Image (cartoon, rainbow, N blue to C red):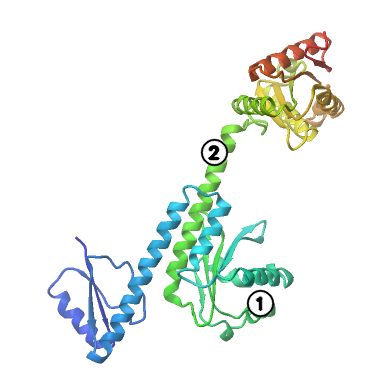
């Protein structure tokens, strides 16, 4: 078992002599940190040797106990955050991280992330909620980008934590000085939030007197910043997995698997609340000819453009899907068949007048045929698809570039 012996004392020369004596007798690693420094990675099977006059042993012992208590609290906070990360959203988790940080660092904390070369405040916490409101109002009124830039520049450029124990003893930009003076901040600690390949932002901890943040506090904030980076990256990975699981990779609209899931859910909602629900099934006219004439690459580009047109023609509450090949579906919650006709007519007009082929550098026109069906209460969602498909078949038979409603058009 690898053990470490820590020698703490007020006399560096005597500590060094003790180290030489012990090194001649044991193979354990021996560390002689300066009194006041943190004791890194102290484990339960390590040894601590106190070397001092009797009158100072009590002071050193209390210092040691304080450091051990800080390590225990830090481990406790990180353990609680790991447990919470299993069930909270990203936004809630970031708020929880800044809140828990105030238990072991400064009384005010912020998480700032970089987006499009600007700094965006993602989470903030202060033990005094009224004071936090005033802090945020001040930040908004006195150039938040300038304040953030001055606060974060050192940490982001060097990739290392920045510690300022006393903000009154350093020169900062006037906006930041006004911010510090108005809210009585004493110390500042900033750690970069870094993923594997880039810096995402920064974790900021600020304290008021009598609490002073010092160099030994930097590893604690770094651990919180690294944990924050992990939370952000995991959330983005989950979001990407969810998006890829529901999105058609070619067109960017939802895929056929998600189509059936959503349609079942919306049909159940329509049944329960007696609301209307309509479905458009859309097919690109003569798509095989486009593929045979210009190739599948051009055909794929046409499908991408059709997906964009459909997205531009519907409400934010409507959903667009690629159901396979050149067939698309549009689910219209809260819309009757009559209301769906207006959406279908808009789609026909946008596709027909959009000159999609010309936009790709080719001659020729592109049109679509559309079938409409509305949900019949008590029937499964599969029937709605079958009805809309039947109406789509009627549109094709009618000469394409037109709309038909199931049960009303023959």
In the figure, 102 relative to 293: above or below? below
Q: Is residue 176 visible?
A: yes
Q: Which one is in front, 29 or 73?
A: 73
Instruction: Locate residue 278, reporting x and y percent.
Output: 75, 24
Residue 46, numbered circle: none
Question: Percent x, y for residue 348?
Answer: 84, 24
Q: Which residue is mark 2?
A: 241
Above or below residue 315? Residue 403 is above
Q: CA distance from mark 2 to mark 1?
A: 41 Å
Q: Quadrant of residue 320?
A: top right
Residue at 42% over, 62% down: 77
Quadrant containing the C terminus is top right
- Image side of residue 6 versus residue 295, left or right: left
**What residue lies at 71% left-to-right and 18% top-to-bottom?**
376
Location of mark 1 (residue): 179
Residue 198 in view, yes or no: no
Q: Residue furthest left?
A: 25
Q: Secondary structure at mark 1?
A: helix
Query: Which of the 4 image quarters holds residue 137?
Result: bottom right
Of residues 160 and 215, the one nearer the viewer is 215
Residue 334 shown left or right of residue 16 in the figure: right
Q: Earlier in the sequence, mark 2 or mark 1?
A: 1
Where is residue 336? Give x, y as percent.
Answer: 79, 24
């Amino acid at each position: 078992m690898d053990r470490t012996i820590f020698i703490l004392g007020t006399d560096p020369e005597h500590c060094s002599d003790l180290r030489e004596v012990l090194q001649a007798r044991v193979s354990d690693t021996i560390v002689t940190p300066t009194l006041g420094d943190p004791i890194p990675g102290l484990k339960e099977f390590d040894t601590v040797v106190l070397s001092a006059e009797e009158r100072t042993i009590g002071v050193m012992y209390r210092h040691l106990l304080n450091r051990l208590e800080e390590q225990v609290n830090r481990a406790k906070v990180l353990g609680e955050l790991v447990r919470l990360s299993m069930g909270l959203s990203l936004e809630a988790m970031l708020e929880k991280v800044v809140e828990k940080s105030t238990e072991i660092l400064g009384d005010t904390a912020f998480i700032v992330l970089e987006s499009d070369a600007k700094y965006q405040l993602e989470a903030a916490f202060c033990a005094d909620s009224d004071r936090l409101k005033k802090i945020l109002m001040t930040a908004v009124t006195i150039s938040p980008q300038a304040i953030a830039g001055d606060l974060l520049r050192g940490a982001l450029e060097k990739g290392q934590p920045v510690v300022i124990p006393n903000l009154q003893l350093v020169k900062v930009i006037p906006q930041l000085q006004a911010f510090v003076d108005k809210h009585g901040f004493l110390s500042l600690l900033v750690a970069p939030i870094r993923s594997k390949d880039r810096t995402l932002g920064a974790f900021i901890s600020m304290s008021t007197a009598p609490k002073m943040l010092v160099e030994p506090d930097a590893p604690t904030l770094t651990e919180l910043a690294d944990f924050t980076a992990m939370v952000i990256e995991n959330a983005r990975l989950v979001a990407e997995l969810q998006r890829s699981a529901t999105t058609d990779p070619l067109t960017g609209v939802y895929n056929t698997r998600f189509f059936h899931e959503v349609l079942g859910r919306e049909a159940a909602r329509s049944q329960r609340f007696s609301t209307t629900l309509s479905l458009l099934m859309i097919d690109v006219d003569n798509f095989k000819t486009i593929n045979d004439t210009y190739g599948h690459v051009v055909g794929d580009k046409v499908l991408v453009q059709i997906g964009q047109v459909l997205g531009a023609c519907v409400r934010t509450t409507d959903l667009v899907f690629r159901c396979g090949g050149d067939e698309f579906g549009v689910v219209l919650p809260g819309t009757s068949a009559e209301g769906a006709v207006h959406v279908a007519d808009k789609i026909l007009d946008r596709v027909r007048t959009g000159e999609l082929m010309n936009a790709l550098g080719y001659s020729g026109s592109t049109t679509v045929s559309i079938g409409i069906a509305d949900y019949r209460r008590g029937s499964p969602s599969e029937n709605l698809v079958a009805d809309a498909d039947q109406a789509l078949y009627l549109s094709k038979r009618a000469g394409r570039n037109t709309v038909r409603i199931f049960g009303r058009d023959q």
